Image (cartoon, helix red, strand yellow):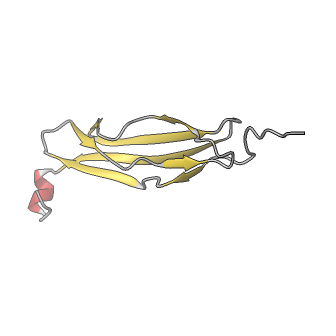
Amino acid sequence: MNTLTVGGDLPPVIQNCPESVTVEVPSTATSGVASWSEPTATDDSGVTPFLTQSHFPGGSFPVGTTRVTYTFTDNTGNSATCSFDVTIFTMSKKNNDMGFKK
């Protein structure tokens, strides 16, 4: 009798989830472009998990903080999530007067 394994009991294992991404833009900017190395995942079934993501590296983000989420789902419905913040900030004149780089 042959046995076919279609998936494991464990959720995918995520590698290289960024901790956070910070980008400085000119004081007049309303957005900035953020890039990062994308996380990957493996699964105990040996099949590459399906990926959904909220944003893509190289995309434009508004000034402020945006939460980025990657969700990896295996073929049996187990999932694992990687989330991190992308922060776009402007350098104000006040900060420049305090000795921060321009």
Q: Quadrant of the N terminus?
A: top right
Place of residue 78 in the rendered image (x, y in percent of width and height, measured from the top left): 68, 40
Place of residue 66 in the rendered image (x, y in percent of width and height, measured from the top left): 37, 40
Task: Please tell me which residue is depicted at 71% across the width and 36% down the height of the picture.
Answer: 76
In the drawing, does residue 27 fall left or right of residue 64?
left
Task: Please tell me which residue is depicted at 12% across the width and 65% down the height of the picture.
Answer: 99
Q: Quadrant of the C terminus?
A: bottom left
Residue at far right of view: 1
In the drawing, does residue 56 fall left or right of residue 90?
right
Give the mark count.
0
In the drawing, does residue 89 fall left or right of residue 92?
right
Residue 15's place in the image compared with 79, above or below, is below
Task: Please tell me which residue is depicted at 67% across the width and 46% down the height of the picture.
Answer: 11
Q: Closest to the observer: 86 or 52?
A: 52
Q: Quadrant of residue 79?
A: top right
Place of residue 37 in the rendered image (x, y in percent of width and height, measured from the top left): 37, 50
Task: Please tell me which residue is depicted at 42% across the width and 53% down the height of the picture.
Answer: 18
Residue at far bottom of view: 99
Q: Closest to the observer: 52 or 90?
A: 52
Residue 48's place in the image compared with 21, above or below, is above
Q: Closest to the observer: 68 or 56?
A: 56
Place of residue 73 in the rendered image (x, y in percent of width and height, measured from the top left): 61, 38
In the drawing, does residue 48 fall left or right of residue 78?
left
